[in-house]
Each structure stands twice: as C-alpha cells, then as structure tokens.
Image: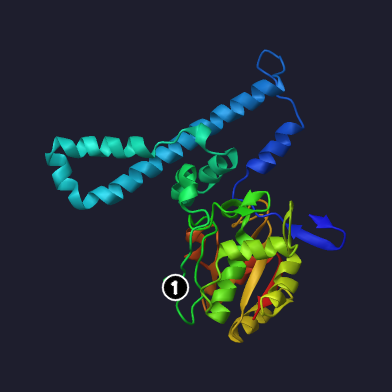
Amino acid sequence: MRQGNTEWDLQVISGDYYTEFGRERGCKRKSRSGNTYSARTLARRRREKRRRKIKHIVQGVCVLLFLMAALPAAGRILQHKEGAEAAEQFLQELKMKEEDYPQELQEMLEKNPETADFVAGYPNRADYLGKEIDLTSDYQTGQVPLLMQWDQRWGYDSYGQEIIGVAGCGPSCMTMAYLYLTGDTSMNPRKMAAYAYDSGFYTEAGTGWDFFTRGASGLGLSGSELPLGEAQIKQALDQGGVVICSMRPGDFTTTGHFILLRSYDDNGFYVNDPNSRKNSEKQWDFDTLSPQIKCLWNIM
C-alpha cells in the first residue's frame, strides 16, 4: 500500500484466504438448479468449511504432540489401560472451542500448523501479557537469534490494532538485528513493537518502510536501502550487517511480510523468517529470493 510517498507493508500470516475472500465478494455463485445463493448462505458455508479444516488440523497436531511425548513410554502405554485413558484425556484437553479464538487466529493455525501452541494458548494469554521477558538464553555472541513473532512471551501483546503474533514481523526482524549487533538482551519484540508504534512507524496498513532507516537510527543502528543485487547483499553481510527484506507474495507470504538474511555460503542464503521455523531451516538461492523481494535494507 502506498500512502503519499511512503509505502507500507501489512504483515499477515501466510495463507491465501485474503485473495479468496476478494474473489468471492465480487461474484455470485449459482446452485445446480440455477438459483443464486444469498451472501449469508455463502458466508455460513465458508465458516463451516473453515471450521472443518481447522478441526482436522488441530486434531492432527494434537495426535502428533501426543505421540512425541508418548513414544518413550509406548510399551507401558500398550500394557496399561490407564495409558490409553491418559492419551484420550490429553487429546480432549487440547481440543479447541472455536468461540474462544478470534477468526484471525483460526486462520493463522489453518495456514501455519507451527503456530498450534500459540493459538491454543490464546485463552490463557493473561499469563504472558506484561510479564518479564529474558532473552539471555536466546542470544549467542556472533549469531543472529531466530525469534518467532508468535512466541507466547510477546505474541499476544498488541501492535496497533493487531497483535505481534499476527502482524509483528517487522519489529521481530528488527529485534533480531538489534540483538546481533548490540548484544543488548534487554530488547525484545514487545519493546520493539512499542517503539515502532510510539514513533509513528505503524499504521493500520502495517509497518512502514522508514522503520528500517529512520527507525534504525533511533535505536543507535544504521539502516540504509540496498539495491537488489546478489553482490550487494553479500557485501553487506560480509561487512557484519544483516539484510531485512520486504517480501512479495511467494514462498513466505501471500500478501506482505518481512524476513531477515543473516549469512550465506556456496549453497545460498540463510534466512530468519519470524513466521516460520521451517523456512528458516532452509537455504535459499538468489534466483528464488530476488523475484519475491520488494525492497531491502542493510542494518548495521
């Protein structure tokens, strides 16, 4: 979105439901008998379809979590009736009541199963809001820490009209850069999101690009826009900085998102994606990344 001379990125969770919604708004579906469904009927069917999909995802995640916890004791579970009862109780406790979860979190889980614990913990978010955050165990000298925007320690905190877990990729990337460059573990995504909001780098459209230039300066860092070139990115990394990228729809998002490039080798670039551990475990070649990058900044 461009406002005046300023471009803004609205970071949202990965998924294609926004584009689907846009298509559905502009047309009417017809039944086989030729009758036109009402908008209310279509909306109800979409909600029912979403509920079924979310239910299947949650059940699958619950089964996986249980198996991971239960495998060391699999023999005992098979031998004792109470083991099966404990398994059933475990599954029942983790099953969701949809009315307790905002639609955006239900969609978040539907599109990104990695967020299961975060979404499941939403009703108990008061246990995390405002609590002290200690990042000393997340940081190692000389390494860029991987921080997830949906970490329960800060993901439920507000970021403008949203929460960090849903819309906080920009502050999360800047926090990773700040910790790496300064070693100051008193900073965290909650504080960074508050700084971005209080300093005017947030609007309803998302995090403004000048957060990575003027905002970086306000933190005692240097942020400058880079040309989109492989040699330029590698040079910035070689000089000890990191590169934050605003991404187009593609492998990382269907709308808008920020990621951080932390290093590279002969096989490609190492990425810190604050919305996906899976993406952060891969290496990405320049030919794959470059068409998806809208803008990028060297943070030093």
User: Does residue 127 appear to the left or right of 1 in the view shown?
Assistant: left
Image quarter where the C terminus lies is: bottom right
Task: Work out whether residue 260 can be spotted.
Answer: no
* Place of residue 244 in the rendered image (x, y in percent of width and height, measured from the top left): 64, 70
Closest to the observer, 188 or 15: 188
* Place of residue 2 in the rendered image (x, y in percent of width and height, measured from the top left): 82, 57
Q: Could you tell me the amino acid type at mark 1?
A: Thr
* Place of residue 110 in the rendered image (x, y in percent of width and height, measured from the top left): 52, 42
Report which residue position mark 1 lands on: 136
Please rate how many residues cluster around mark 1, counting C-alpha atoms within 10 Å: few if below 14, some from 14 to 19, many from 20.
few
* Place of residue 13 in the rendered image (x, y in percent of width and height, measured from the top left): 59, 50
Q: Kindly give the residue lying farthest to the left in the view shown.
A: 79
Q: In the picture shown, does residue 63 fall above or below 128?
A: above
Q: In the picture shown, does residue 235 fall above or below 203?
A: below
User: What residue is at 50 percent from the left and 67 percent from the top?
Assistant: 146
Q: In the picture shown, does residue 2 fall above or below 122?
A: below
Quarter-of-image position of residue 230: bottom right
Image quarter where the N terminus lies is: bottom right
Task: Work out whether residue 196 can be spotted.
Answer: yes
Element type at mark 1 = loop
Closest to the observer, 299 or 264: 299
Quarter-of-image position of residue 159: bottom right
Closest to the observer, 205 or 236: 205
User: What residue is at 45 percent from the left and 50 percent from the top?
Assistant: 127
User: What residue is at 14 percent from the left and 46 percent from the top?
Assistant: 75
Q: In the picture shown, does residue 233 fall above or below 24?
A: below
